Image (spheres, rainbow, N blue to C red):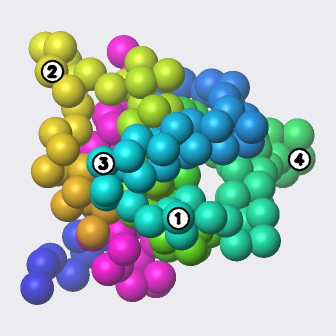
Amino acid sequence: MGHPNAESKLDEPDGQPHESVLDTDAVRQAIGQLKARLLQNGQATELFGQEHDQALDGILGSLHQTFDGRLLYPTAQGRLAHLLYFIIKDHPFADGNKRIGSFLFLLHLQFYGLHLAPGGHARFADNALVALALLVAESDPGQKELMIRLIQHLIGEEG
């Protein structure tokens, strides 16, 4: 496989602290709009986006957690990486977890101004985001921190 210390070489990137914009009402509204478009195109069923026991509240709430008065995920990159990971791995929806996680990830990348790479092209091509979502979905839970750091590095530092 890879170098035995490969995981230790992927340090957490620096990022600027940001306030969170992960408002649950806005997120649910965006998911509802996505579901309507997918239903209209025959790309989803009624199960798409149906929450399990308000699990989305728990995920979004965890991204706002503080310890000793400081945010646990103070940077946009950290929050976005955890958002994608938690939506995909925790399965808060009956159907569509990877698509919803990817959608919310892109939506918030755009909000934070992180959707474009240096040079002005999209930071994540569609096929790259699909591959990332599948990688997260298939990853061992013991690799969580590695997956988070990988996502953060793919997002990059803020300019």
Quadrant holding the C terminus = top left
Q: Amino acid at mark 3?
A: Asn
Other-residue count near label 1 (Cα within 10 Å), few / some / many at <14 / 14–19 / ≥20: few
Residue 145 in view (yes/no): no
Please give left or right for residue 50 compared with residue 147 in the image.
right
Mark with earlier residue (3, 2): 3
What's the distance in space between the residues labelled 1 and 4, CA to CA? 42 Å
Which residue is found at the position 88% from the left and 47% from the top? 68
Q: Is residue 47 above or below residue 24?
A: below
Element type at mark 3: loop
Which residue is found at the position 36% from the left and 74% from the top? 137
Q: Where is mark 3, residue-wise?
A: 41
Q: Position of residue 57 (x, y in %)?
A: 77, 55
Quadrant hosting residue 74 = top right
Q: Where is mark 1, residue-wise?
A: 46
Give the extent of the magenta segment: 135-159
What's the distance in space between the residues labelled 1 and 3, CA to CA? 13 Å
Q: Amino acid at mark 4?
A: Asp
